[in-house]
Amino acid sequence: MAKVVCGATRRSRLVFSSASASWGPLTRCPLSPCFGDARSLETLAFEEIQASEKPVNSTAFVLHGLLGSGRNWRSFSRDLAAELQKSSPSQVWRMVLVDMRNHGRSAGLKGLDLPHDMVNAAKDLANLVKSHGWAWPDVVIGHSMGGKVALEFAASVARGDYGELAVLPKQLWVLDSVPGEVNSDETSGEVEKVLLTLQSLPSPLPSRKWVVDHMLNLGFSKMLSNWIGSNLKNEGQHVVWAFDLQACIEMFNSYREKNYWPLLEHPPKGLEIAIVQAENSDRWTQHVIERIDYLSRKEKGPEEGKISLHVLPKSGHWVHVDNPKGLLEIVASNFYSCT
């Protein structure tokens, strides 16, 4: 089990909720106030990290990108929790690393609302909060597709989609995720190439090594090929994906189509949307950067929130891998604090 280190305090605290995991029972919410009807739904798998033995008084959700899982963000989340604990000892943060629908240990969950899109992926978060009786998250951090799920979550709370008791986050961190529609003609098209390649592979797959070598032979980078290989799990004599590929493709199409510029142009009162642009990422056009920069400088009315733009140097799209120290410095130094 992983260790979380904060000064002299050493804590091991990983809490899982999953349909098939042996480490914990499936959590269900059968009551209509939770989901709006009488169905019994499985909740998303998640993992908790905190850097202190003290009672938690603040919560941040951490959302991975397409084909990822919460575990991709363990190291960063540990470091962030420890850094926040040092800077503000009275505010004890709990990082909830979520496996979004069709990904990681949430792949194969039954009873989730269809279609597989940003709206329902965000609704899953609200259902997770309600089913466990948690306080609503103070901060939501989302990378790539997870960034758009975070934007949808905040927009839905502001509209009242999750009920009157839902509380708007104080801050969103949108990590290298363009808020508007994504035109593949304006990017390298790497994601589309990966998805098409994965669709073409045999099932079941011979081995993790076979998949990684195949990706390398097709010209994909070593880092990307190894990362794709890390999303495989053993099943008998073969390996299978830890995600639902077809459902992930549906989510990717929704990610490309959704437009959250209206939210950025008029953020709800009390919300800060912090956007991190990776310096070497191919996701950004000059027009998009200038538009966000303008919104971050624009004077806001008393009933509006704020926008901030941060550039992460020496990093491509994989911000937590390319420059984790730089990302930690940006996020920790600008993180929401109630003190």
Image (cartoon, rainbow, N blue to C red):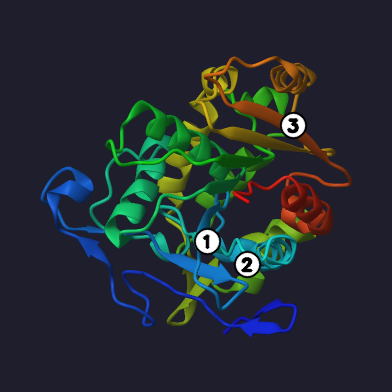
Residue 265, picture quadrant: top right
Front position in the image: 311 or 255: 311
Residue at mark 2: 74
SS of the residue under disc 3: strand
Q: Position of residue 218 (x, y in %)?
A: 72, 52
Under mark 2, the amino acid is Arg
Give the Cα distance between marks 3 and 1. 24 Å
Disc number lying in front (3 or 1): 3
**Looking at the image, which residue is at 68% across and 23% down?**
185
Mark 3 vs mark 1: which is more N-terminal?
1
Residue at mark 1: 97
SS of the residue under disc 2: helix
Disc number lying in front (3 or 2): 3
Q: Position of residue 217 (x, y in %)?
A: 75, 57
**Looking at the image, which residue is at 69% across and 39% down?**
176
Residue at mark 3: 309
Q: Residues within 10 Å of mark 1 (few under 14, many from 20)?
A: many
* Placement of 5 over or under 327, stated as above or below: below
**Looking at the image, which residue is at 17% across and 47% down?**
33
